[in-house]
């Protein structure tokens, strides 16, 4: 097996396959996994319940969500009885998952770029120059603009947002004692056209970000982030250090792609469009789809029958979140501050609040592709370690 891309999707898929006894090479063009992080790293309750992520690399729980109109006045506050979100220390998480992968027997090749495939032979460019790798199947875990999807003739993401954020540590002295960890979201098409601007403060770190359709940023994403950071809600009195970590990347929001597998391999994570089209959350979908991909590949390798990959059917899964795709189209139509203000006003009504709670605290962001219990599978792995 060749898995291209050691983000969350690639690490998870490679590890699951190696535990099942397969020979797995995991290649990533990055030379280190703890640099160029491209995600805020918010894990939702459903992921925390189902997947065995190392708790020491997860921030404090967040139960409060606050939704603002463009004026930031009279926001809608939603409090949950549950711990809804935790923000991962993604650099540490990637390293921990890479260590688990190594224990499982995955061969991790960093500084190694996938170039293309001819049949079972795959061209890579590693630290020592060009190399060819022979693999029965290739897994494209190589992100939103997947080269593996192109090479295998599979579907490719067409609808992409771009997102950028600044991250900084908040010293305990820098906050008011009554501050509650919270996820603040602003609906303002001037700053986040087709999506949201956010401030997430979990009591340890603050993340300030914007995302939207790239062609709707007349002055660029950076300019919008700078303007938002100057007035971002939820950070009153919090000192912003001179040096902040900057993260940015594309987010596919067109929904899970239909053709995500062929006889030579398949796609997982962002490469497969496995992102909730409405919330733009990709970490939960990427883990669920990776677990399913490992099941399907395992069967194909054991039986020697490439037709097993037909069970990995994006079109069937996509049909199960049609509602979210419709809501994405609705969000993309919010083009003026007046419409944004009216949308937030609708969320102040009892039915609006109930709908917001269902979407933001519910379990429906991505359909469960397979009847497996990943936490059980991973707990078994942990015992073997
Ligand atoms: C700013 C931002 C904030 C976000 N915040 C959240 C959030 O808080 N919660 C959430 O659920 N989702 C969030 N998302 C979405 C989420 O981060 C992604 O859906 C998820 O990380 C996708 O993981 P992945 O493994 O599929 O892809 P990636 O993490 O993009 O990994 C792809 C890997 O492939 C490698 N690669 C690419 N091309 C090649 C090649 N040719 N050869 C070798 N290697 C290659 C890359 O180096 C990379 O390591 C956010 C996205 C952005 C951009």
Image (tube, rainbow, N blue to C red):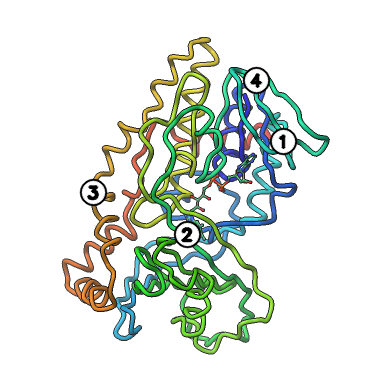
What is the crowding at mark 3: few (fewer than 14 residues within 10 Å), some, or many (at least 20)? few
Residue 171, image x, y percentages: 64, 80
Residue 249, image x, y percentages: 54, 57
Residue 271, image x, y percentages: 49, 40
Label 1 with label 4: CB-CB less than 8 Å: no
Label 1 with label 3: CB-CB less than 8 Å: no
What is the crowding at mark 4: few (fewer than 14 residues within 10 Å), some, or many (at least 20)? some
Q: Residue beneath label 1, please? A: 108
Mark nearer the viewer, 1 or 4: 4
Q: Residue beneath label 3, please? A: 323
**The C terminus, quarter of image:** top right
Q: Secondary structure at mark 4?
A: strand
Q: Is residue 222 left or right of residue 364?
A: right
Which residue: 52% across, 24% down?
265
Mark earlier in primary sequence (3, 4): 4
Furthest-top residue in this view: 304
Q: Residue beneath label 2, please? A: 162
Depth order, front residue of 56/140: 140
Mark earlier in primary sequence (2, 1): 1
Residue 121 bears which disc, if any?
A: 4
């Amino acid at each position: 097996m060749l898995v291209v891309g050691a983000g969350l999707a690639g690490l998870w898929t490679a590890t699951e396959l190696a535990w099942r006894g397969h020979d797995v090479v995991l290649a990533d063009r990055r030379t280190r996994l703890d640099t160029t992080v491209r995600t805020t790293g918010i894990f939702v309750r459903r992921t925390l319940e189902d997947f065995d992520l190392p708790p020491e690399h997860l921030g404090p729980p967040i139960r409060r969500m606050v939704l603002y109109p463009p004026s930031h006045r009279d926001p809608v506050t939603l409090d949950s009885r549950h711990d809804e979100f935790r923000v991962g220390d993604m650099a540490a998480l990637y390293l921990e998952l890479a260590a688990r992968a190594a224990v499982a027997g995955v061969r991790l090749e960093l500084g190694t770029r996938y170039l293309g495939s001819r049949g079972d032979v795959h061209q890579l460019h590693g630290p020592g120059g060009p190399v060819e790798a022979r693999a029965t199947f290739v897994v494209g875990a190589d992100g939103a603009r997947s080269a593996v999807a192109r090479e295998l003739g599979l579907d490719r993401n067409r609808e992409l947002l771009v997102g950028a954020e600044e991250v900084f540590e908040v010293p305990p002295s820098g906050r008011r004692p009554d501050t509650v960890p919270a996820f603040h979201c602003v609906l303002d098409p001037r700053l986040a056209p087709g999506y949201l601007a956010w401030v997430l403060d979990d009591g340890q770190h603050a993340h300030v970000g914007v995302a939207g359709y790239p062609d709707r940023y007349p002055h660029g994403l950076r300019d919008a982030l700078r303007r938002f950071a100057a007035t971002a809600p939820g950070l009153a009195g919090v000192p912003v250090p001179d040096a902040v970590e900057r993260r940015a990347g594309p987010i596919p929001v067109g929904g899970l792609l239909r053709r995500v597998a062929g006889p030579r391999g398949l796609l997982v994570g962002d490469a497969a469009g496995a992102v909730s089209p409405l919330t733009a959350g990709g970490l939960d979908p990427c883990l669920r789809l990776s677990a399913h991909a490992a099941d399907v590949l395992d069967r194909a390798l054991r039986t020697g029958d490439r037709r097993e990959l037909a069970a990995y059917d994006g079109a069937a899964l996509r049909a199960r979140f049609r509602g979210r795709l419709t809501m994405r189209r609705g969000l993309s139509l919010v083009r003026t501050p007046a419409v944004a203000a009216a949308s937030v006003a609708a969320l102040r009504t009892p039915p609006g609040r109930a709908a917001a709670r269902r979407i933001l605290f519910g379990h429906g962001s991505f359909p469960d592709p397979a009847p497996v219990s990943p936490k059980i599978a991973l707990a078994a792995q942990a015992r073997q370690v």
